[in-house]
Image (spheres, rainbow, N blue to C red):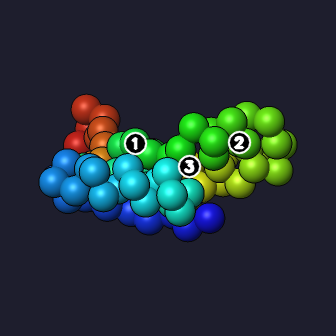
Amino acid sequence: MKTRTIASTEAQNNFGLILNDVMQNHTRYVIKRRNAPQAIILSLSDFEQILADQAERTKMTGLVRDLTPAYSLGEAVTQSDDNGS
């Protein structure tokens, strides 16, 4: 099974081709928006296999964990006390 990432606009413009690839070749697509993963497209048979097989669930959990963006905006703010230090 292959997993590919694709931009949301490209997925929108090529949905029919993606759907065919998902159904015929069991390719999984991770849809990215603004360069961050947002959704996964996979066939119903792949989804059933994930639900039924612990090893497949573990693989999918790892994939989702690896693709989940780690948000770390800004920097920690340190406050000085009233003495100006």
Task: Give the percent coordinates (x, y) of residue 80.
Answer: 29, 40
- For disc 1, the marked residue is 39
Position of the N terminus by quadrant: bottom right
- Nearest the camera: 46 or 55? 46
- Left or right of residue 70, residue 80 in this image: left
Q: Is residue 54 shown to the viewer in this render?
A: yes
Residue 26: numbered disc? none
Q: Amino acid at mark 1?
A: Ala
| C-alpha separation, residue under disc 2 versus residue under disc 1 | 16 Å
Q: Residue at x 47, y 54 (%)?
A: 22
How many numbered marks are there?
Answer: 3
Q: Residues within 10 Å of mark 1 (few under 14, many from 20)?
A: some
Q: Which mark is residue 50?
A: 2
Give the residue at the far right of this rendering.
54
Q: Is the residue 9 above or below the residue 1 in the image?
A: above
Asked whether 46 or 78 is in front, the reply is: 46
Residue drawn 39% across the image and 55% down it = 20
Left or right, residue 10 beside residue 73 = left
Q: CA distance from mark 1 to mark 3?
A: 10 Å
Of callouts 2 and 1, the N-terminal one: 1
Q: Secondary structure at mark 1?
A: strand
Most foreground residue, 33 or 77:
33
36 vs 5, nearest the viewer: 5
Q: Which amino acid type is shown beneath numbered disc 2?
A: Ile
Mark 1 vs mark 3: which is more N-terminal?
1
Where, by quadrant of the figure, is residue 77 drawn? top left
Q: Which residue is mark 3?
A: 64
Labels 2 & 3 near each other (Cβ < 8 A): no
Q: Earlier in the sequence, mark 2 or mark 3?
A: 2
**Can residue 11 be seen in this snapshot?**
no
| Label 2 residue SS | helix
